[in-house]
Image (tube, helix red, strand yellow):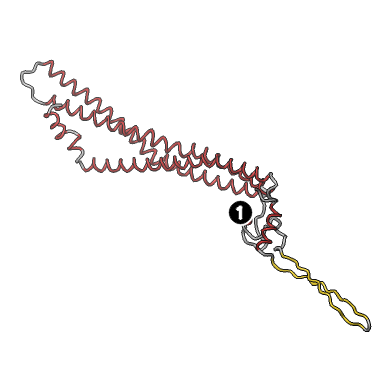
Amino acid sequence: MSATRERTREVFGFKKENLENPNVILYQQEIGKLKKDYRELYEASKAWMDSLAKMKVEGELLSNAYNNFGQTTYHKEGINLSKIHVYLDKFNQNAKLLYDNVEDNYFKEIHDCYIDHMKAIDTHDNKTHHDKLSYEDASTVYHKPMYHEDEKKGRDRFNKMTTAQSVYQADYIQYMQLLANLESRTEYDIPLAFRGLMKDIETFFEKGRQDFSYIDLPEWRRSDGKDSFLEPTLNEKYTNWNEKREIPVVETETVETKEVASGSNTVYTTTKTTTTAPITESQADTIKSDLIGNPIN
């Protein structure tokens, strides 16, 4: 490109004059922030969807593990583990439903706005700028005085300018239409997607509460009223697989024999005394092993 054309672009074209216009600067800042917000929203939403997909798969593995462990004789609460397996199956079904609903009602809209519209705007923005510069170059060449030029060359310069102008105007109209579509989606469709997401999450939790109340799950509470689920229970000094069972104690019998003189005879009196005391730590471990089953080597 000639030095004259380069200077023309700097003075009259998009490179210098338009970029320094306050309205253009403000527009670029707003578009830049919108692109950044959409990119972050898309990436965060995609990461969350990936987590939901992973939870579906790993939830099935956990459910199967509970079911398999509950069918063994390792531990007398096996039947309760099988009940938890049923609840986990329900949870996995709800997680799958949540994933499908969020994908249809929320993520698809975010994906379309960012991947399709934002990238289309970026591509068309660059094309519009390029065609604008081409039109400005053709206009500069046409309006530049040309001495000793025949009529045909003048018409060629005019045709080149009008063609470039038509291309630029068509690009500009399409670019503004893309922006209008994005603005409409941002103002109306995206808020609808957000509300759909909240509704899907609410449905997920509500369905989970219903499933929990319908299934005959074990009551994991100790006799003292404190919450105690499966893992904390096994860490106690005793197991509470039967809630009505008292805290284990050790009964100790003491037998004492005394000689009592009664006339000419000697009478032997035997006294049997039974005392109770809390079990020791080693005794608790023994009881726990008996209740749960033989240790696994």
Q: Quadrant of the N terminus?
A: top left
Res 278 quadrant in image: bottom right
Instruction: Reply above or below: 240 against 136.
Output: below
25 left or right of 157 in image: right
Expressed as whole percent of the image width and height from the top left, the position of residue 85 reads: 64, 44
Q: Is residue 223 visible?
A: yes
Around disc 1, counting alpha carbons within 10 Å, would you say few (fewer than 14), some (14 to 19), or many (20 or more)? few
Q: Secondary structure at mark 1?
A: helix
12 left or right of 101 in image: left
Q: Residue at x 90, y 78 (%)?
A: 267
Q: Which residue is mark 1?
A: 231
Front-lying residue, 151 or 59:
59
Instruction: Reply above or below: 163 against 242.
Output: above
Front-lying residue, 128 or 43:
43
Report the residue that reaches farthest toward the left.
148
Expressed as whole percent of the image width and height from the top left, the position of residue 23 reads: 23, 42
Res 62 quadrant in image: top right
Residue type (three-letter) at the residue carrying disc 1: Glu
Q: Is residue 214 visible?
A: no
Expressed as whole percent of the image width and height from the top left, the position of residue 68 reads: 65, 42
Q: Residue at x 61, y 59 (%)?
A: 227
Front-lying residue, 255 or 231:
255
Expressed as whole percent of the image width and height from the top left, the position of residue 146 reads: 8, 22
Q: Residue at x 75, y 70 (%)?
A: 275
Q: Residue at x 52, y 45 (%)?
A: 201
115 left or right of 68 in image: left
Count of labels in the image: 1
Report the residue that reaches farthest toward the bottom.
263
